[in-house]
């Protein structure tokens, strides 16, 4: 079964500090993609970062980076220099190439304290 | 800009009504998805489609059906709405290449 697990329902961080959100996945496909999406109070889902499974190098987008551990099926998101605008729900997702199925975890609510 | 548009942002329906939630994308994407979002349960996949007239069950298809007659439009149907279907519904689309999902703004459905 294709499942995504986010074990931290809520996290908080001080402004300018670094926080790491955890995600593990379970997929039987060799062709898959992993994502982190952000959902602010406006409800619009925004792509934060994307990782192709065949790439060994960890993806980075400005202050956002991932730690992709393929053997451990782990995909954590690190947010550096946290800003108030980073406060949101964060969802980890897994897109299986064979079935074209995209599933998400339960989400982590991130609070950024000034 | 890719646009995924859901027909309503808020919707109130009565128990037993047939409800249609519409989703339209303008980027010629092959894949389209319907999710429901509930507090503490995250995004759960209801149905998805990888081509016109093709559909696959997701993780929670019970009580729902879908229709995809045209590539750009993917409809979610509640045949007989029930109060436990009160939720936020999100539509998404993605191309085969790139494997990147774009979301609509969500429909908050209340069944009374």
Image (tube, coloured by chain):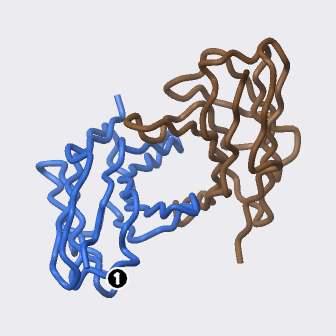
Chain colours: A blue, B brown
Identify the residue at the far front of this view.
Answer: A114
Tell how many labels.
Answer: 1
> Residue B74, relative to residue A58: is it above or below?
above
Who's the residue at 49% across and 45% down the image? A102
User: Relative to residue A87, is residue A43 depicted above or below?
Assistant: above
**Which residue lies at the image location 36% right of the left edge and 34% below the top edge?**
A2
Q: Position of residue B47 (x, y in %)?
A: 62, 32
Q: Which chain does the numbered disc 1 sit on?
A: A
User: In the rendering, at what x and y percent does residue A44 appear?
Assistant: 58, 62
In-image side of B36 versus B53 (left or right): left
Q: Residues within 10 Å of mark 1 (few under 14, many from 20)?
A: few
Q: Quadrant of residue A57?
A: bottom left
Mark 1 lies on a secondary structure that is strand
Q: Which residue is drawn at 53% across and 44% down?
A: A100
Q: Residue A104: x and y, percent?
A: 41, 45
User: Where does the C terminus of chain A fall, quadrant-wise?
Assistant: bottom left
In this rendering, the answer to whether B67 lies above or below B52 is above
- Is residue A106 left or right of A101 when viewed as pictured? left
Name the residue that disc number 1 marks: A61
Most foreground residue, B15 or B105? B15
Locate the N terminus of chain A by quadrant.
top left
The residue lying at 57 percent from left, 58 percent from top is A43
| Horizontal and vertical percent position of residue B112 | 73, 21
């Amino acid at each position: 079964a294709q499942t995504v697990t986010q074990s931290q329902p809520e996290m908080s961080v001080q402004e300018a500090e670094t926080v790491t959100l955890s995600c593990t996945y379970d997929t039987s496909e060799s062709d898959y993609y992993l994502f982190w999406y952000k959902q602010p109070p406006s409800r619009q889902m925004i792509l934060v970062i994307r990782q192709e499974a065949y790439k060994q190098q960890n993806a980075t987008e400005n202050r956002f980076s991932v730690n992709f551990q393929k053997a451990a099926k782990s995909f954590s998101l690190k947010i550096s220099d946290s800003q108030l605008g980073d406060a949101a729900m964060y969802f980890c997702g897994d897109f299986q190439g064979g079935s074209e199925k995209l599933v998400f975890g339960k989400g982590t609510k991130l609070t950024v304290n000034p | 800009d890719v646009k995924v548009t859901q027909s309503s942002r808020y919707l109130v329906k009565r128990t037993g009504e047939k409800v249609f939630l519409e989703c339209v994308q303008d980027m010629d994407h092959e894949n389209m998805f319907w999710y429901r979002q509930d507090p503490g349960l995250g995004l759960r996949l209801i149905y998805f489609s990888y081509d016109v007239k093709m559909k696959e069950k997701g993780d929670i298809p019970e009580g729902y059906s879908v229709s995809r007659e045209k590539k750009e439009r993917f409809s979610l149907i509640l045949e007989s709405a029930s109060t436990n279907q009160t939720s936020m519904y999100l539509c998404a689309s993605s191309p085969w290449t790139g494997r990147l999902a774009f979301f609509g703004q969500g429909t908050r459905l209340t069944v009374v």
